Image (cartoon, coloured by chain):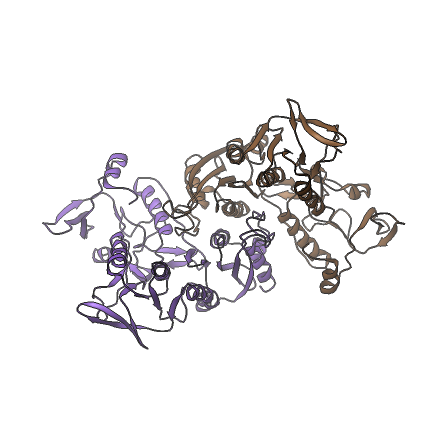
Chain colours: A purple, B brown
Amino acid sequence: MARTPQVFREEYDIDARVLHEAIQLDLGRRQVRVQKVGGGEPWWEPFDHLLIATGAVPIRPDLPGIHARGIYGVNTLQSGIDVRRAVDEDRPQRGVIVGGGYVGLEMAEGLRLRGLDVALVERLPQVMGTLDPDMGALVSDALRQAGVDLYLNETLSGFDVSDGRVRAVVTDRRALPADLVILGMGVRPNASLAADAGLALGERGSIRVNERMQTGVEGVWAAGDCAQSYHLVTRRPFYVALATVATKQGRVAGINLGGGHATFPGVVGTAVSKVCAVEVARTGLQERELRDLGWDYATATIRSHTRAGYYPGAGRITVKLLAEKGSGRLLGGQIVGAEGAAKRIDILATALHAGFTVGDVVHLDLGYAPPFSPVWDPVLAAVRQVLKLV
Amino acid sequence: MARTPQVFREEYDIDARVLHEAIQLDLGRRQVRVQKVGGGEPWWEPFDHLLIATGAVPIRPDLPGIHARGIYGVNTLQSGIDVRRAVDEDRPQRGVIVGGGYVGLEMAEGLRLRGLDVALVERLPQVMGTLDPDMGALVSDALRQAGVDLYLNETLSGFDVSDGRVRAVVTDRRALPADLVILGMGVRPNASLAADAGLALGERGSIRVNERMQTGVEGVWAAGDCAQSYHLVTRRPFYVALATVATKQGRVAGINLGGGHATFPGVVGTAVSKVCAVEVARTGLQERELRDLGWDYATATIRSHTRAGYYPGAGRITVKLLAEKGSGRLLGGQIVGAEGAAKRIDILATALHAGFTVGDVVHLDLGYAPPFSPVWDPVLAAVRQVLKLV
């Protein structure tokens, strides 16, 4: 817990009421219907300004057996505590993860470290669909080396249950025995309260907001995983549920709500993760997105080292870049590698914000010393390659 | 050795003549006077294009005793081999470093790791004068914790020598007993050949070139530590002797020399180093430079962590930012911290290339996951602070 209700009260003079649920919004009368969790009479609470920060909810398809014991999502503090208790007390031997995104991969690693046999089911032909297949394959390799069995191109159809407890995960191709199941099937915006009150929804059902995080109604704001964002590379509305975006939107909404002026320009699609022995990062657009947009692009991939090759601790790093043909505009990048690899994506993310061409990026005055990088930083080495192709 | 003469010949069809010295340039007749190292008759070698890449030479003041045995510069492969041999064979117990720049600090750490008592003399009130004093103090702390005795504000006046061997380093305040002395007093451009041939010199005596790395004479180029650069923040000529800048200039000169077209826009003053337990980084302008320019600036410094505070391996990081008052333009940044700290400077370097304000930087979509960063990357946390002051 970053801050308790007591800290909110004493340090910020904010009345933070936990275990209270907002169950209805009346934007005309400017009031919120509130009920204590666990029951009791609801009441109307008036507001001058309203911030909707209802976050996202995990996707949990209505499949046979999905409510059995032993099946967990990992989206709240309590759900994490529940999984840890299950591992400690039930001593499960076989864990099955459904979904090869960030949560699924982190949990696969976690269960392996706790000694379980782990299988992972993913309906796409690769894990981490936010990477191109060639880069995703490097992540699959790292998972397999950590002892995770991958079942790609398989769709979840349900669960075998007996005595109210999950026994197997059933896909369109097999049944995988399971003592413990983790669902990591992504999230959707938790926007039903806003929608019921008549607020407009946008990308993937997120609450539509302007640059100041204001909804269509004066004095009603939305921020975080429930709110829409904007993609600075495609120049189109975009939805992404990441803490780093949510906190930036929250800061902007807070400034505006407090009478100041701030705008949130948007995102470039950056995400980083650690999966077993590799660090993984991406920003901008991937090949599938570029094909969907019909944009003509060049791509280059290089292998290099995280430090000077002769320096102790130098590890492998693979960098892939995408740039627009003709203009040379940088469109995206992906990185998989050893310690020190992932945060290099920030160079490319900053370059995307600047609208740089790869001709601009190749001259960036980046930090070099043997403990940190080869003389040509791997990012710049990749840029040199793609420069020849745009 | 990155490439031997054999590799140059067989893979690139380049006749690389090592142990040959260019002793004179005749730009009118387009020829170079060459002599084999160790003597023999010099001869004139004709050229169509000439690239001057003579690098830099270490500053070695003409003080009493400077030629004694036991005093080393560390600027060539051979000088590094010489120092290592001296440590292995002469078993020195007391090492004294003259100069608190990158080379001096790396050698101080190296000699401590080899078990020597180490003292370091620096004429400035701080080590690493490319940092502001408050940030340089953090580096001094790291050196002292590693057992290096610092003598700041002291000027080298000479050496005590007996039997041709150094016995002590003498400053304006004391004599420091020494079995081994390392000179790390910086470098100057090795431009005498160019100057003697009539080529114009610029900043700190470096060879003046245009964006294509061309000197004032058609077909005569210069690149690397002997050549002038340009500072993109001050928009003035600049001299810096760093491998990462030299290789970029070399690439541009090579493309142009080969009949292509490339330009080198300049640098933003980025440098990174590892000093004992801390990583150190800087980019842009520091307070002293801003005062000299008469620019009005705001500055903020924050302390944060290299990873989420609760994540294993999270270390301390201090980030200082400088921004122009009024416009809010980012002017520079400095970072000192644990593993993972230094390369964050690349975010600020890229932002300086883009000419971003701190208002632009605060919204950068940087990578976040607990193994890599707090939710607010330390760089952005510092930006939030300086934003309030510009």
Q: Residue at x 63, y 28 (%)?
A: B123
> Looking at the figure, which quarter contains the N terminus of chain B?
bottom right
**B339 relative to A290, above or below:** above
Q: Residue at x 13, y 52 (%)?
A: A38
Q: How many badges with numbers are in the image?
A: 0
**A385 relative to A36, above or below:** below
| Horizontal and vertical percent position of residue A80 | 28, 55
> Looking at the figure, which quarter contains the C terminus of chain B?
top left
Q: Outermost residue toward the left?
A: A41
**B297 relative to A77, above or below:** above
- Tell whether A63 sits left or right of A105: left
**A288 relative to A276, above or below:** below
Nearer-the-camera pick, A123 or B179:
B179
| Horizontal and vertical percent position of residue B124 | 60, 29
| Horizontal and vertical percent position of residue A321 | 52, 61
| Horizontal and vertical percent position of residue B57 | 72, 41
- Tell whether A49 sits left or right of B385: left
- Tell whether B319 sits left or right of B15: left
Q: Residue at x 32, y 51 (%)?
A: A224
Nearer-the-camera pick, A358 or A166:
A166
Q: Is residue A280 visible?
A: no
- Tell whether B89 sits left or right of A132: right
Q: Outermost residue toward the bottom?
A: A173
Q: Outermost residue toward the right?
A: B41
Q: Is residue B278 visible?
A: yes
Nearer-the-camera pick, B1 or A290:
B1
